Image (cartoon, rainbow, N blue to C red):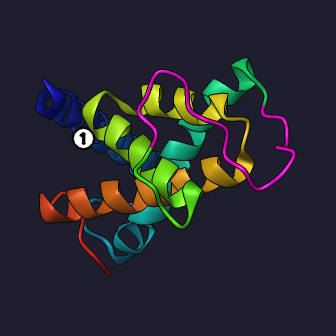
Amino acid sequence: MANEILEREIASLEEKLKEKRAALGHNERGPEAITNDKEIIRDIITDQIQDVTLKAPIEPSAGPAVPPIQNIPTPDSSADPVAGHVQVLVQIALGKGIKEAIEAAVQTNNPALIDAFHDTLVDQLYDELVARKKVEQP
């Protein structure tokens, strides 16, 4: 099931990547497309986060503590609680779907966590697309 969700997420990301490339006027294999693929993926994920946050605005957290994420396991003890939560959120994204992970991240009302999750998710999705030869590294 988790693999099926990941495959759907990757297919959706590939389609959105093609659409954004076309909208930006980049061809499939031109040098501009290659150097901008990661930024395009970043924009796609940013758009998804904004869709969720428009429904539930983020309020700045009161401090460095990361509130527990509802209905998901707490990460193993870690020197950096944000990093632990980011890994849990990435696992949710790859296993249950990006939207569910974004919703869980937004529930924390922790902009630092959401930003770290965003960066990590973009990196992992980009690496997955590179491994599948859907994009090329510059």
**Left or right: 110 with respect to 14?**
right
Left-right relation of 43 to 66: left
Q: Residue at x 67, y 38 (%)?
A: 67
Q: Is residue 2 left or right of residue 84?
A: left
Residue 14 point in image, percent of width and height: 28, 44
The quadrant of the rendering that contains the C terminus is bottom left
Residue 107 belongs to the span the image colors magenta = no
Q: Nearer the viewer, residue 101 or 38?
A: 101
Picture quadrant of residue 56 = top right
Q: Judge left or right: residue 43 versus residue 25.
A: right
| Residue 1 percent across, percent down from the top left | 12, 23
- Out of 1 and 30, give the one closest to the viewer: 1
Q: How many numbered tags mark residues here?
A: 1
Instruction: Kindly tell me whether residue 76 is visible in this rendering.
Output: yes
Q: Is residue 41 visible?
A: no
Three-letter code for the amino acid on which mark 1 is drawn: Ile
* Residue bearing the label numbered 1: 10
Q: Secondary structure at mark 1?
A: helix
Residue at position x 21%, y 36% in the image: 6
Above or below, 76 against 130 in this view is above
Badge 1: few (under 14), some or many (20 or more) residues near its Cα, within 10 Å? some
Determine the residue positioned at 53% across, 67% down. Answer: 79
Q: Main secondary structure of the magenta part?
A: loop
The correct choice, above or below, for 79 with respect to 25 in the image is below
The magenta segment: 58-74
Residue 68 within the magenta-colored segment of the rendering: yes
65 versus 19 height, above or below? below
